[in-house]
Image: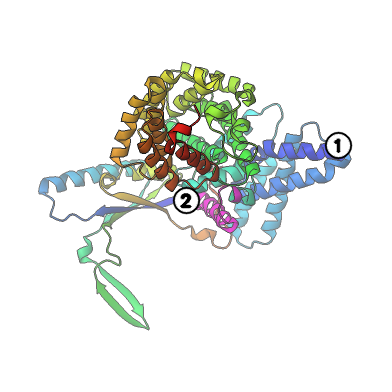
Amino acid sequence: MTGSDTAHEIVDRLFREEQGRAVATLIRVTGDFDLAEEAVQDAFIRALETWPERGVPDNPGAWITTTARNRAIDRLRRRRRSIDKIEALGRETAAEQELAATDPAPAEDAMPIADDRLRLIFTCCHPALAMEARVALTLRTLGGLTTPEIARAFLVPEPTLAQRLVRAKRKIRDAGIPYRVPPAELLPERLDGVLHVLYLVFNEGYAASSGDELIRRELCAEAIRLARTVVSLLPDEPEALGLLALMLLHDARRDARVGPNGELVLLDDQDRSRWDATRIAEGTALIEAALAARRPGPYQVQAAIAALHDEAVIPNSTDWAQIATLYGTLQQMTPSPVVELNLAAAVAMADGPAVGLAMMDGIVASGELDAYPYLHAARADLLRRLERWSEAATAYQRALELTTNGPERAFLERRLAEVRRPATRPS
Amino acid sequence: MQYALLIYTPEPTEEPSQEDLADQMAAYDAFTAHLRERGSMLAGEALDSTATATTVRVVDGRTITTDGPFAETKETLGGFYLVEAADLDEAIAFAAMIPAVKHGCIEVRPVWDYASVGAGRPATAAAQH
């Protein structure tokens, strides 16, 4: 491996880890998202140019932030020269002095920098911004994903996403969205908003339905990284711990849930030896710590459910009774027909298919999930297990009408063929 | 920063009773007093019903007036406050105290800053320093 390769790798890794930090600090000091992003980008380009030759500095993160600060000062000076407004000049000069006066990366004092990132997360996830803008802005400014990467991840045209980012930054500036960690009375509500954005980012990365596998992996990694940041800065918030645990406990199964041809492998059929034991251990420890605070919330409950699945070495050893209890709790916290369906499926595993089927029939009667393929597929499965073949076939057909995903269709068609000719079904 | 808090409510179909009206006035007086105490009150008025509105356009130099508001909507602009607030969070907190927020909604709009023309707006974070 050549020296230049090593420097490139360090810059690459550093970019993921440090760019959010540097951008956050420069936004605090300059109040200007674009200036901060451009200056940090400049600094990384500079690192790529100089490190292979001169070697990597002792504290690369501090080098990046200091270089970015100098680039920001340069850019402000250049901008000032092209501005003739007196008031504007006064303002830019103030920002410039502020920049020159701060040492943005004192190595021994990391805390104020960490605070900058926390501030930035709360600003990017402010409820006055549209949800999709919050997600895009968080990934762009804190995660360091590029606009084309985010556009690909969310299947939107690049110009649309670029426009979304421009509008969001403009609103932050012009509507006076504050750059701060909210005061105590707003914190619970705002933290919920931040966690929800990270949850959406993770889900998008975890969903098997869309997008390019590499980008989706990156989304999950980014959501986990940002959740770690929130947890490290707000260690006493059990829901933040719960969300990080939830992500890790799901991510642990990532390699096992995709088959050799990219198809989704159901939980029961996964090779559990391919689950990531380190992630499971970390996630389990986190959820235990969170639950010990005795302030339960929906993320903690979902993480506890994921932990129970992860603990089962074989599908048959899954503690379904406990999982059913937890879904019941979740249903009380955040009532939704989808949670009710999960509850019914867990009850069917714990107490037998007839009990679960009665609950699912109730959901069918309410009509709320009629267009949800998993309701019909789950119900079909219980009917199959109860050997009510023709009803099972009808339910599988309904699920098939609603399913577009190829591997899922193949699975449903196989089941449908089985229940139509029960004599030939595999025992 | 200055913000306009625009109050949108469904227009009442019947005259409110004297009692209700007095209650409403008292609630608004209390809110206005709170703004004044904090030095945040710049202006505020209630508007008469949209039945009294006239919409004006000038087309080809001719002034054309039509009876009624510019758009028929379920909720109509019934009044406004102009407040001074540190940031959007404070403006939102004020908006949430306006009595009408319980049956209508408040649109929070920053007042445009003339000084920023051509030079880029002052950024919030920098302005706080």
The chain identifier of the residue carrying mark 1 reads A
| Whether residue A210 can be seen here | yes
Residue A398: name its quadrant: top left
In this picture, residue A91 sits left or right of residue A392: right
Residue B69 location (% of width, % of height) = 27, 66
- Dot 1 falls on a residue whose secondary structure is loop
Question: Any mark on residue A55, and which?
Answer: 1
Depicted A319 relative to depicted B82: above or below:
above
In this picture, residue B25 sits left or right of residue B92: left
Q: Nearer the viewer, residue B94 or A344?
A: A344
Give me the residue at 41% from left, 25% from top: A346
Q: Which residues are magenta?
A: A152-174
Name of the residue lying farthest toward the front: A423
Residue A64: name its quadrant: top right
The chain identifier of the residue carrying mark 2 reads A
Mark 2 vs mark 1, foreground winner is 1
In the rendered structure, which amino acid carries the disc numbered 2? Ala
Work out whether mark 2 precedes mark 1 in sequence or the reverse, and give the earlier one. Answer: 1
Question: Any mark on residue A256, and which?
Answer: none
In this picture, residue A339 sits left or right of residue A198: left
Residue B79 location (% of width, % of height) = 28, 55
| Whether residue A32 can be seen here | no
Residue at image mark 2? A175
Q: Nearer the viewer, residue A61 or A256?
A: A256
Q: Nearer the viewer, residue A356 or B111?
A: A356
